[in-house]
Amino acid sequence: MEEANLTDDEVVISVLNGRRQDFEILVRRYSTKIIHFVTRMTGDADEGRSLAQDAFLKIYQNLPYYRRENNFSAFIFKVARNLTLNWLKRQKRTVFFSRLLGNELNQPAFRQDAPRLSPHDQGERDSLVSLQLRLLPEEQRLALVLKVYLEFSYKQIADVTGWSVPKIETLISRARSRLKKSIRLQESGGEAVEQARNQ
Amino acid sequence: MNCQRITGMLSALQDGELSPSRRQEVESHLRDCAACRGERDGLLKLDRRLRLEPAPLADPFFSARVMARLRPGPVRQRRWLQAAAYALVFAAIFLGGFILQTTGSNGAPPATAISYSAVLQEPQGLGLMAIHDDSLGLFAGERP
């Protein structure tokens, strides 16, 4: 049977029956989405790729625990979500202790001083959007990233996170509203800086 | 229906996640309320901007890298294996302790105990004292 015709569950059975090389089919199928998800969550493309690799290794190790009646996409995103949230926790601890020791880290993912940019600079404006996304609370960011970038339905997000659909609705609504406000604030600040420079 | 309640539903409207009755409610409110329409347009604009963000570049060697890092051999339920290994180690420690205790109480001390007591008795003999006298002689300029 051709690779494209195989369902995820059929590939999983094949891997569990000893055809280890078939796991590559699943990696090829989901790598772009997993890398995209992790990169949006961490705000770091290199870290995204590295964590995505770890996620696939974890998925491979946990294949025997995958229940075939569930959907495989939710299973792998759960693994990726757990790895990413653990990574974010570790980063927060590092930043906390670093600040405690008076040694401020200058990592873009955790820098609280969002740059005030001119709204005329499109490239910079795009990075402003992703910076503000990274400053959202983790739960809001997770729900919004799955919705906007992965185009998951609320039900699919519920399968990955274990949250109720009303909670997801609230989180996404708050995330959008917060993001809209913070971008507006940054841009109006940027305009003020621009005007001051021109005077 | 108040605007605050409507704006809370605009995000779900945009995602196509409202029930038909709620959607109808919100859409009829939007027809009459310019402020809420402005809110909805703002959300649409935000989503467009979010989607304009470039996706991470594809890595053509990604799957090869993952496959190279996989352990050789079939996937197994390794948790049972780990649990069995831990149980074996604990059983070995327990058995070892038990055997040592029982052989230790049966009259003859083990060989290590004998050699240890011999060392303890040594300072009373000539060995260490003789070394001590020789060293004193060396310090005094005498040749051995």
Image (tube, rainbow, N blue to C red):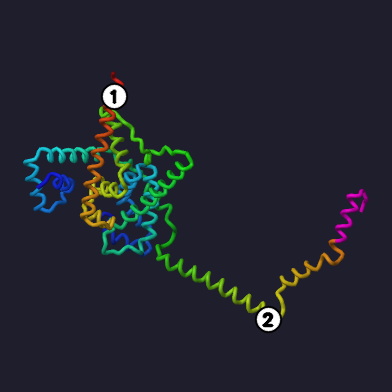
Callout 1 secondary element: helix
Q: Residue at point 71% right, 76% down? A: B109
Which residue does the image show at 23% across and 52% down from the upper left? A168
Q: Are marks 2 and 1 on the same chain?
A: no
Left or right: B97 in relation to B138: left
Percent x, y for residue B46?
22, 39
Other-residue count near label 1 (Cα within 10 Å), few / some / many at <14 / 14–19 / ≥20: some
Residue range (magenta): B129-144
The stretch drawn in magenta includes residue B135: yes
Q: Nearer the viewer, residue A113 or A4?
A: A113
Q: Tell me the residue that label 2 is attached to.
A: B106
Rendered image: mark on residue A194: 1
Q: Which SS type dominates the magenta stretch? A: helix
Judging from the image, mark 2 belongs to the subunit labelled B
Q: Which residue is at the front of the view, A130 or A199?
A: A199
Question: Does residue A198 appear anywhere in the picture?
Answer: yes
The amino acid sitting under disc 1 is: Glu
Query: Is residue A130 shown left or right of residue B44?
Result: right
Judging from the image, mark 1 belongs to the subunit labelled A
Q: Amino acid at mark 2?
A: Asn
x and y, in percent, of residue A145 in the image:
27, 46
Q: Compared to B126, does B3 lie above or below?
A: above
Q: Is residue A59 magenta?
A: no
* Gap between marks 2 and 1 measured at Cα: 93 Å
Left or right? Give the position of A119 relative to B130: left
Q: Residues within 10 Å of mark 2 (few under 14, many from 20)?
A: few
Q: Quadrant of the C terminus of chain B?
A: bottom right
